[in-house]
Structures are given as structure tokens and as C-alpha cells.
């Protein structure tokens, strides 16, 4: 297929691993200008950029969405074209109305990670693993999410609070949702996936059938409970697990720079991580809703988008 931004290897990575890292999706200076605006919002909570003594909370939430012009300039042609490289040209709901009305993209919410989990050694969390869309039912062809965008507005190095992603996990979720065609609410689906798949069961410590499903939404890394294990980094990050369907699974950090965006399959498991860097991490999530549901049975194979191909190839029986 012809693409405008992403390379063929990036397309293949998205299909197989469930995400691709788009560097400089929008200009670094635009990201830093937006970050400065967010500092003015933090000041309303008594958190001052130039006074680290006010950084007393490990995670500070800015529970707002913004459509100010300094965020709109982050809606670059490069980012928009990369999105359509994955979901298909003309299939993104927001781009279809671009220039036809005055609706602006909303950017938010903002979990600003100052030092989550900095009081203990860095490790792979137990809680917090999820995919987005808690308040709606999920189907294998759901249009509401499109892609999950993880948009970065600060420098994030190793162990610096980047989002952890579970490579290949979108395939498990796609197959689960295909088996439950009547739809599942996210908490139910996540709880079911955690208990039914051996790698996810180990990752989330979901051995108890009575485990509370809501635990998967522990949003902050400092809320994650001690796994009681000293080898989680080796088991989940340094080794690749291959399940019975040939799905390759591994947890990875996503170090990024201001202006970078991770374009993720909507079913990709991800989690907050500890920030041991001493530097605040600024990021937000965005959806890219589709105009129509994914079509997993197209008459012409060339019409499949990478998003549809990734989802379709994940289902054991299509």
C-alpha cells in the first residue's frame, strides 16, 4: 500500500506489535509551548515550575481538555497523514470534517508524573494494565477509538515515567472480542483476558478468580502493589513470550521527546510506569474515531487498512 509518512517496516511493526513510534509528529517547540501552558494550570494547584519544593505529589492530574491554538498547531499534516496511513485514507472521523466546521481537537486529560514510584526500585507494574474506553462496550470492529495516540510534551528517558506497552497484546484482545460478538464492557473484557491468557495472568497477577476487575484501572504507578517477585524485568522485558497461537509478547518502555507520538492499536495493553528521573513527565492520550466500523471482510484485499489487517490477522478463525 502507498503511505505518506510511515515506512513499510513501521506498518509491519504496527500490525505485529500493535504500535509505532512517530518521532517529531509535531514540532518540539510547539510541544514545549504547550507544556508551559500546562505549568500555568499546575500553578492553580500550588505546583510551581521553578520551585521543586512544591512538587510534593508524585502524580498531579489536570482533569481538563484544551482546544487553545497552541494545542491546535500540534495537529500537523505529518501526524494526520500518519494516522491515515494506519486507519485508511478518508476513514478518520475528525479529518473528514476538517475545514468544514469550527470544531477543534481537544487535548487532555493530563496525568503529570513527577515521581511516581520513586521511593522503590523500578519494576514492571502489576496493576494498571488496560486498553482505553472504560465507559463503553467493546466489539472487535469498534469505531470509537480508531487509534490510541500517546502524545508526548516532555523529554522522557529510561525509567522516566514513559507509558509501558505490551507488544502483541492487541492480538489477544482482538481474538477475545471476536469470540464475544455481543460486546463486552472494558472492565469485564480486561478481567476476562487477564484470567484466561497465561502471560497476561502472570503479568497482572490475576490468579484469584475473585480479583476485583477495577484494579486494572489503577492509573498511577505509585499505586501498583509489590509483585513479590524480583525477576519481573527479566521475565516480561528481557524475554519474549510466544503463546499457543504464535503471538509474541513483551513489555517495553517508550522513551520519547517532546513532539513524539505513539500510534497504538486500540486494543494494545499499556500501563503507567515509575518515574525515577526527577523530571516531570507531560503527556496525554487521544482517540482518532473512525467514520464507520472496521470492515474485516472486504471484497478487495487491497482495501484493508493496516488497522484492519492487524485486527483480522489476530483472530484465530476469521
Image (cartoon, rainbow, N blue to C red):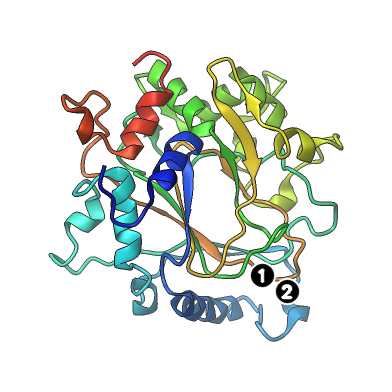
How many labels, in total? 2
Quadrant hosting residue 269: top right
Taking 309 as reference, is 120 above or below it? below
Residue 276 appears in the figure: yes
Q: Residue at x 57, y 43 (%)?
A: 270
Of the numbered discs in the image, which one, if any, rests on residue 280? 1
Q: Nearer the viewer, residue 244 or 152?
A: 244
Of the numbered discs in the image, which one, if any, rests on residue 55? 2
Q: Residue at x 73, y 57 (%)?
A: 159
Location of the N terminus by quadrant is: top left
Q: Secondary structure at mark 1?
A: loop
Q: Secondary structure at mark 2?
A: loop
Where residue 154 sits in the image (x, y, percent)? 58, 70
Where residue 163 sits in the image (x, y, percent)? 60, 52
Where residue 55 sits in the image (x, y, percent)? 73, 74
Q: Which mark is nearer the camera, 2 or 1?
A: 1
Instruction: Say whether marks 2 and 1 touch (CB < 8 Å).
Output: yes
Q: Residue at x 47, y 34 (%)?
A: 16
Taking 53 as reference, is 262 above or below it? above
11 relative position to 277: left or right: left
Taking 225 as reference, is 255 above or below it? below
Q: Nearer the viewer, residue 237 or 60?
A: 237
Where residue 142 sits in the image (x, y, percent)? 32, 34
Amino acid at each position: 500500500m502507498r503511505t505518506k509518512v510511515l515506512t513499510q517496516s513501521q506498518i509491519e511493526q504496527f500490525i505485529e506489535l500493535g504500535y509505532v513510534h512517530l518521532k517529531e509528529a509535531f514540532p518540539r517547540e510547539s510541544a514545549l509551548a504547550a507544556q508551559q501552558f500546562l505549568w500555568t494550570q499546575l500553578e492553580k494547584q500550588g505546583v510551581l515550575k521553578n520551585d521543586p519544593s512544591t512538587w510534593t505529589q508524585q502524580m498531579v492530574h489536570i482533569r481538563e481538555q484544551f482546544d487553545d491554538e497552541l494545542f491546535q498547531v500540534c495537529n500537523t499534516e505529518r501526524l494526520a497523514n500518519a494516522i491515515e496511513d494506519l486507519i485508511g485514507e478518508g476513514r478518520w472521523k475528525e479529518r473528514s470534517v476538517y475545514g468544514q466546521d469550527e470544531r477543534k481537537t481537544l487535548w487532555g486529560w493530563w496525568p503529570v508524573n513527577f515521581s511516581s514510584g520513586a521511593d522503590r526500585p523500578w519494576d514492571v507494574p502489576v496493576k494498571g494494565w488496560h486498553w482505553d474506553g472504560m465507559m463503553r462496550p467493546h466489539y472487535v470492529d469498534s469505531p470509537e477509538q480508531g487509534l490510541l495516540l500517546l502524545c508526548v510534551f516532555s523529554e522522557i528517558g529510561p525509567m522516566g515515567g514513559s507509558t509501558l506497552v505490551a507488544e502483541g497484546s492487541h492480538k489477544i484482545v482482538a481474538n477475545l472480542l471476536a469470540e464475544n460478538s455481543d460486546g463486552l464492557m472494558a472492565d469485564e473484557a480486561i478481567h476476562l483476558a487477564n484470567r484466561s491468557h497465561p502471560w497476561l495472568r502472570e503479568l497482572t497477577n490475576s490468579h484469584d478468580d475473585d480479583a476485583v476487575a477495577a484494579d486494572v484501572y489503577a492509573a498511577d504507578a505509585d499505586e501498583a502493589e509489590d509483585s513479590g517477585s524480583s525477576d519481573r524485568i527479566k521475565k516480561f522485558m528481557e524475554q519474549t513470550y510466544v503463546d499457543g497461537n504464535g503471538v509474541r509478547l513483551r513489555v517495553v518502555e517508550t522513551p520519547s521527546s517532546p513532539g513524539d507520538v505513539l500510534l497504538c492499536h486500540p486494543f494494545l495493553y499499556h500501563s503507567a510506569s515509575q518515574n525515577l528521573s526527577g523530571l516531570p513527565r507531560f503527556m496525554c492520550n487521544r482517540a482518532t474515531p473512525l467514520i464507520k466500523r472496521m470492515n474485516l471482510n472486504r471484497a478487495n484485499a487491497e482495501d484493508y487498512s493496516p488497522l484492519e489487517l492487524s485486527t483480522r490477522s489476530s483472530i484465530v478463525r476469521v
